[in-house]
Each structure stands twice: as C-alpha cells, then as structure tokens.
Amino acid sequence: MEEKLITKKNGMAVLILSIFGFIICAAMCIMAGIRLDSNDTDPVGIALLITGIVLITVIPFLWGGLKVIKPQEALVLTLFGKYYGTLKDNGFYFVNPFVSAVNPAAGTTLSQSGDVDDGSKSKTGVQVNANSDGAGKKISLKVMTLNNARQKINDCLGNPVEIGIAVIWHVVDTTKAVFDVENYKEFLSLQCDAALRNIVRIYPYDVATNVDTTGDGEPDEGSLRGSSEVVAKRIRDEIQSRVNCAGLEIIEARITYLAYAPEIAAVMLQRQQASAIIDARKMIVEGAVGMVEMALERLSENNTVELDEERKAAMVSNLLVVLCGNKDAQPVVNSGSLY
C-alpha cells in the first residue's frame, strides 16, 4: 500500500466560516422569533427557525474534521475501513469528519525516548495500555532511541554473555508502519532481540584462535570486546533488513552493555588474571635475559674480570633470580678470595 499524503491545509478557513455560520444562524433564529411573535403561522419565520436549528446542529459536527499536526508528527486516516490518507506536514487541516485515525501502537510504550513509562513494563521492555484514547493516535516521526532489555546469549564458543544495545530509529513510511504489521513498536523490539542473538553467536567474547567471524573461511581476530564497531554495524544492518516491511529506518545501533554472565564471570576473571600474569612474567624474563647478556658482554669487552663457564653459569643464575624475583634481593658481600 502506497502512502498518500493530504496537503490541503484549509482548516483555518473552515473554522472561520463555521464561526460566521454560527453568527448567521443566531441572526436567523432572532429574526424567526420576531416574525413568529407577530404571526405564529408565518412560513418565512418557521423556515428561518428550522434552518437556523439545523445549521447550529451541523456546524459543530464539521469541527470533528479539524486536525492540527505538529512538526514531526503524522496521522493515518481511514474512512469506513478504507485508507483515506496521511497528514504528515505540520499545519491546520480539514478532512472528512467521518474519518478515524489509526495507530495500533498508540498504547504501546518501550524503553526509549518519546514514550512515557509508569514503571509497569514487562521484562522485554514492552508495555501495552488498553486504555488509549484518540489523542494518542498520532505517529511520531522523531528520531528515537530504543534500549531493549539485556539478553543472555551464548557466543560462538558457548560462553554465556550478557549484552544490551541501543537502537536509534524513526518511522519513514507511516502506511507500512500502521497497515503492514500489527504493532510496529513491538515488531521493532522483537526484531532487535532476534538480530542481536543472530549476530552475537558469530563472535567470541575475546579473541580466539580458529574462529571465522567474517564468513570468508579464514580465521580472524574478531571479537565482541575488540570489534564493537564492526559488531554494532552488523547488528544495525541485520535489524534494518528485518524492519523494512514496517516502514522503519535504523539509523544506528550501539552496544551499551557487555559482560560475561554471572555464573562464569568469576572463572573468566581468573582466566584473564592468569593470562595477564603469564604475559607479565614473559616480559620480565625477556628483559632479564637481555640484561644478563648485556652484563656478560660488557664484562668481556672491558676485561673487568675473567670468568670460566662454571662461574658464568652461576652469575647468570644469580642475576636471573634477582631480576625475576617478586621481592627485593638480599645482597651477600664476599670479602674473601674470588674462588
């Protein structure tokens, strides 16, 4: 179904004419009263009275067709079940008084900007209010940010990960949003959850060996923690492909929370600590070996002291103990002979 825009902004003209109509009707009733006072059967007076009463009854009914649209708002209208048109540009409109506004998502609030929450949202962040009046039938065209509830998802290695995203979106086609899906807000929320789960399962939390995250058949260094920009872009593209049918545009998707699930968080922290300790020890040993080599070379070049192989080995051992130890070494001064 194609979106049909209503562009005639004649609401002010209709309002002014209706006010003048009221004045004329009042004048007609007054004239009818004067004529009927003198002659109860005056046909002109009776005609004026009946016409005035009918017009006074009809004119307020026309006011039901006056619609005010603010900037970045839209109103989808139907006439007896048939699509009538969409008011999308801000202004004062007059439409058929029999039309009715349609917005199945009018009573649905999400964890996002632009929605009012009374604290009774469900776990998924979606709340449906049954009591939604006509004032809430307008569709917001503003850019909004959806913060769905955090999800627990297994990464490509099977580790449970908790992740949350913020999706920046807005409505671009009001007709698709209203008529092609049951509730475009709930539809967006569910598709965000599905797309997030579909992308996260491709990546490991940290860089892992022999993992292909790009689909080219070659292992790479992609990870949820280290490739957040790439992951967010893939999530955005995945969501967009799913919500095109609802007339929505996904501007951006960002990861707002990322952590291991509580049941394995402590173990993974110990693993990270062990990895950090190993890396630190490796750097210390490499530095100590370099310092020992430099010391032996300097002693040999300057002929400071001549050491045999056994004494060199003892010196290397002592230096490595001193340089690689966790505590400060306690020096021992040899006041005797060299050997």
Image (cartoon, rainbow, N blue to C red):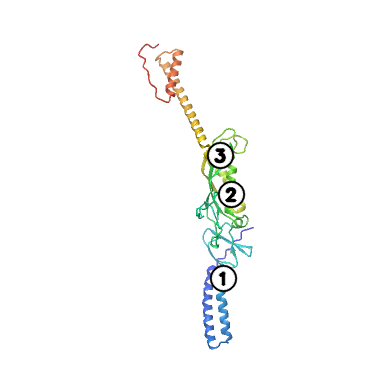
Residue 262 in view (yes/no): yes
215 shown above or below 27? above
Report the Cα–Cα distance between label 3 and label 1: 61 Å
Report the Cα–Cα distance between label 3 and label 2: 20 Å
Q: Residue 79 is drawn in which quadrant?
A: bottom right
State left or right for residue 218 relative to residue 327.
right
Q: Which is nearer the N-term, disc 3 or disc 1?
A: 1
19 shown above or below 106? below
Q: Which is nearer the N-term, disc 2 or disc 1?
A: 1
Q: Amino acid at mark 3?
A: Pro
Q: Position of residue 170 (x, y in %)?
A: 55, 53
Q: Find residue 190 and name its label.
A: 2
* SS at mark 3 in the image: strand
Residue 294 in view (yes/no): no
Frontmost of labels 3 and 1 is 3
Report the Cα–Cα distance between label 2 and label 1: 41 Å
Q: Nearer the viewer, residue 90 or 174?
A: 174
Q: Nearer the viewer, residue 267 or 245?
A: 267
Q: Amino acid at mark 1?
A: Leu
318 shown above or below 168? above
Quadrant position of the N terminus in the picture: bottom right
Residue occupying the far bottom of the picture: 38
Task: Determine which residue is flagged by label 1.
Answer: 62
Task: Determine which residue is flagged by label 3.
Answer: 160
Q: Position of residue 309 (x, y in %)?
A: 46, 13
Q: Which is nearer the N-term, disc 3 or disc 2?
A: 3
Q: Amino acid at mark 2?
A: Leu
134 shown above or below 143? below
